[in-house]
Image (tube, rainbow, N blue to C red):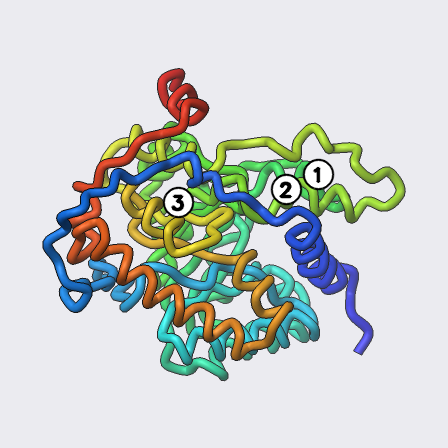
Amino acid sequence: MTESGQAHRKNEHLALAESNFRRTPPTSSLEDVRLIHRPLPEIGISDVDLTVQNPDFNWQYPFYIEAMTGGSEKTGEINQQLALAARTTGIAMAVGSESIAIKEPAQAASFQIAREVNPDGFLMANIGAGHSAENAQKAIDLIHADALEVHINAAQETVMPEGDDAFYWKDNIKAIVEQVNVPVIVKEVGFGMDAQSINELSALGVQYVNIGGRSGTNFAQIEDRRNRETPDQYAFLYDWGQTTAESLLEAQRAQDGVTIFATGGIQSPLDILKAQVMGAQTVGVAGHFLHTLLTTDVDGLIAEITRWQKQLTELYALVGAKNVTDLAQVPYILSPELKNYNDQR
């Protein structure tokens, strides 16, 4: 089957994300956060319960496979493998943007495969904030999703050669939250969040916000590299936005009532722990898991996720936390640069 330009773009996103990862392995912004070691934790590893304490997201583990791909034959194969890893390890998974499947029904199978492989797992649908509530429900129904991610990506669209040039999204987000039949998470795709935007989303009725910070997959760089006629013309936007660590500090300044998810450059179980200590309830992992899959195989990814599950349990015990609630009592300090950011804000 000859693939459309949009399907080809999905393949380019996948290839460029992995190319960037190999060329310049990401450094987590959470390295600017140090947890204070207390040598008397008074806990056993068997006491630890990693369960997410939320009725909408009753997960056994507080991390998941974040949205990556779908929309072409190649990316459908990736979704199949990711879904197998999710099913085997018992973690949740989000698919990539399903807007292409709404425009091109022939591409629906590249997303539906995730539900076929993982019929009883927790799957999250994905649609852009420019879509209507009707389209959002179609994305949910397409994979019988348990939740919906609505992504906001103004910076990516700005650099994308065929990107949108109007970002009137609030009315759509409000309608989606009010009308779809599953919980809605509004997420940035990698440029971070600020306290004001989190408060604005809360005012629209959004209960779940994924801060999607800079330091992971860089869509400004990816879209710029796709423009072969004049590459690197948006290089000045490669460090645009707030990092994951900065965005978590912003979330602390926002009003109560919004549950925070975090993603963006997560490289280890320690990054997950740090993000949770800073206020994230759950943490999404994309680039690292994709790289693991592409450089090993699905068994390698399963082994990596299983190792992270074990190590995160050990880390909870190391800081004396029996569950996520206890993490609020874990002390930490910020690097001078991150402290300076926080002080100025």
Under mark 2, the amino acid is Gln
**Residue found at the very far top of the displayed protein:** 344
The answer, for residue 37, to whether it is visible in the render is yes
The answer, for residue 207, to whether it is visible in the render is no
Residue at (28% x, 55% y) in the render: 315
Using the image as rendered, state which of residue 150 and residue 33 is in the foreground: 33
Secondary structure state at the residue bearing disc 2: helix
Residue at (34% x, 32% y) in the render: 199
Whether residues under marks 1 and 2 lie with C-beta atoms below 8 angstroms apart, the answer is yes
The residue wearing badge 1 is: 159
Give the label on residue 175, or none: none
- Category of crowding for the residue at label 2, using alpha-carbon neighbours closer than 10 angstroms: few (below 14), some (14–19), many (at least 20): many
Q: Position of residue 333 (x, y in %)?
A: 31, 31
Give the label on residue 174, or none: 3
The answer to which of marks 1 and 3 sits earlier in the sequence is 1
Secondary structure state at the residue bearing disc 1: helix
The residue wearing badge 2 is: 156
Q: Examine the image and state in which quarter residue 13 appears.
A: bottom right
Q: Position of residue 213 (x, y in %)?
A: 48, 41
Using the image as rendered, state which of residue 239 and residue 46 is in the foreground: 46
- Category of crowding for the residue at label 1, using alpha-carbon neighbours closer than 10 angstroms: few (below 14), some (14–19), many (at least 20): many
